[in-house]
Amino acid sequence: MSKHLTVGRLLHQLQTADPDLPAYLAVNPDWPHSHYVGRIVIGHGPNGAAVYIAEDGQEDILPPDVRTELNWATE
């Protein structure tokens, strides 16, 4: 998958999930924690308009099955 995820592709991927599930960001494979999703804003990116999803604090360590699905090795 391209590193440049579009809003349309993100929506497509989320459509199969239960809309009542909580959403988190998984940010760093070397420090695998879940982070709360913060504000979403439209701003100017390096190539024009872009959508930014803010991180709003850390919750907990990612579960092993999530790290495995993301191919983030656990040692």
Image (cartoon, rainbow, N blue to C red):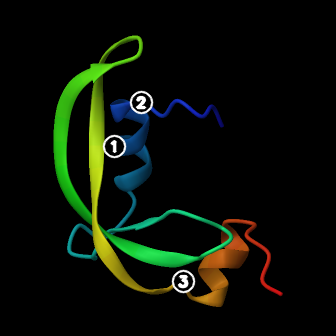
Per the image, label 2 sits on a secondary structure element best described as loop
Q: Distance of mark 2 from mark 1, alpha carbons?
A: 9 Å
Question: Along the horizontal axis of the image, is 54 left or right of 39?
Answer: right
Q: Which sits earlier in the primary sequence, circle 2 or circle 3?
A: 2
Of tags 2 and 3, the one toward the viewer is 3
Numbered circle sitting on residue 6? 2
Per the image, label 1 sits on a secondary structure element best described as helix
Numbered circle sitting on residue 11? 1
Callout 2 touching callout 1 (CB < 8 Å): no
| Front-lying residue, 14 or 66 | 66
Callout 2 touching callout 3 (CB < 8 Å): no
Label 1 CA crowd tier, 10 Å (few <14, some 14–19, many 20+) = few
**Which image quadrant is residue 69 in?**
bottom right
Quadrant that contains the C terminus: bottom right
* Residue 25, position as x, y percentages in the image: 41, 64
Residue at which label 3 appears: 62
